[in-house]
Amino acid sequence: MVGSIVDGSYSISKSAGRRSTTVARLSTTSRRSTDLTVTVTVTTTVTVTVTTTATETVTTTSTTTNQLQLTIGVHSGSLIWSLMYPESGSYPYWQQIKEHIKYCIVQFYADLNDDGSLTPTAPIHFPLEWGCEGTDFDNLMLYCQEIIRNGFYPIIDLFLNNFETVTESGLRVFLANWSINLGENKVIWVPCWEYNQVKAPGWGTGSSRSYRIEPTDFNRVMMMIRKVRDDLRIGNILLGAYPLLWPLDSWDYAQYGDRLYEDWLPGMRMADILGVSSYNAKIDEAWEEARRLYYCINQPEKPFFFFEYANDYPQTGSVVTAGFVNDSYAEIPSHSFVKVIIWWHGTKYTPETIEAIGINAASYEG
């Protein structure tokens, strides 16, 4: 059965070979019974007004508390191209450590329309040509299902190309449809990332726009997304947010300092999962900056991810070494707020690097 929501009302239609449910289940199947758990509690107040006759309305208000159980220890992940596609040169090596890799991230770009549909703003391919392309709703669901079928927890970076102008009605239909069709499965959705770029246009490979989003727009829309998600009492779509972690010696940080993060904090606090992307060969600096941002957000009950992590930007061609991997994992005991490291990008890893990721992932996953 495939579920949908139209004009605020749920409807269910039969479809051969597909199963779905209108109930957002609050549990998920873990591949490892020893995983630690972090519970994010969401208290939702819903007011419903029902017209019973032409002249009478009845209004009821109910408050519910949903516990979103995210199964995590200190875990590792990588890009979908590396983990799932034999065409990737590193695929055979990631397969050798697959049992220790829990998270798979994929990046898409689309406009979210008022009717809840997605219009791709870049070409659609299956499989992805390298990991960042356009999508519509059917393609989005296909990737969610494939990632889950391969045993990974999906991180869906779906950048809303029209982020600043999305409507509450469009979000309501989209999130309800997505939740229904996920059924008992869960995803982490990041609706934009690295939004704290200084210059526009900045990079945004696969997208027709810069990643930069003005703080006022980011905070407003993140609050709206959170409100819609909670109003619908959706428990299987967790909201993530991550800025770019600027190296201290970068021109951008020298010019703007902590304002590169502070102005976006209200919107970041709407997320269930906090984090950063970090491309910095100075490991100690990167982890300490991550700690400082985490404390600045001041929501210690929430897990923190390195959603993208490497020693340099992929465009430079720098190779992530086994030594960099070992030294990065060695930071975990003194930075216990970090729960997940997503290694980026799979084309810049040697077999020795991936072996080191596997050894360390097994040691730290609990």
Image (cartoon, rainbow, N blue to C red):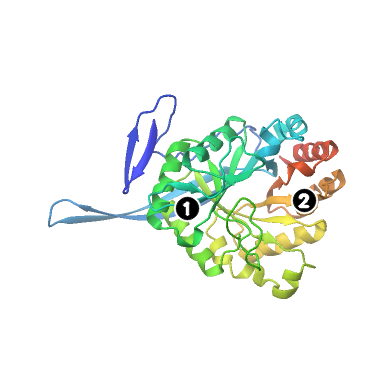
| Location of residue 63 in the rendering, given as x and y in whole percent from the top left corner | 37, 54
Regarding residue 243, the answer to whether it shows in the image is yes
Q: Which quadrant is the N terminus positioned in?
A: top left
Q: Which residue is mark 1?
A: 42
Query: Which residue lies most toward the right here?
Result: 323
The label on residue 333 is 2
**Along the line of sight, which residue is nearer the eye, 270 or 141?**
141
Kindly give the residue lying farthest to the bottom in the view shown. Answer: 255
Tag 1, which secondary structure? Answer: strand
On screen, 13 above or below 330? Answer: above
Q: Which picture quadrant has residue 346?
A: top right
The 10 Å Cα crowd at callout 2, few under 14, some 14 to 19, many 20 or more, is few
Q: Amino acid at mark 1?
A: Val
Q: Is residue 346 left or right of residue 215?
A: right
Task: Report the residue at 35% width, 54% height from top.
Answer: 46
Number of the label disc, if any, that sits on residue 109: none
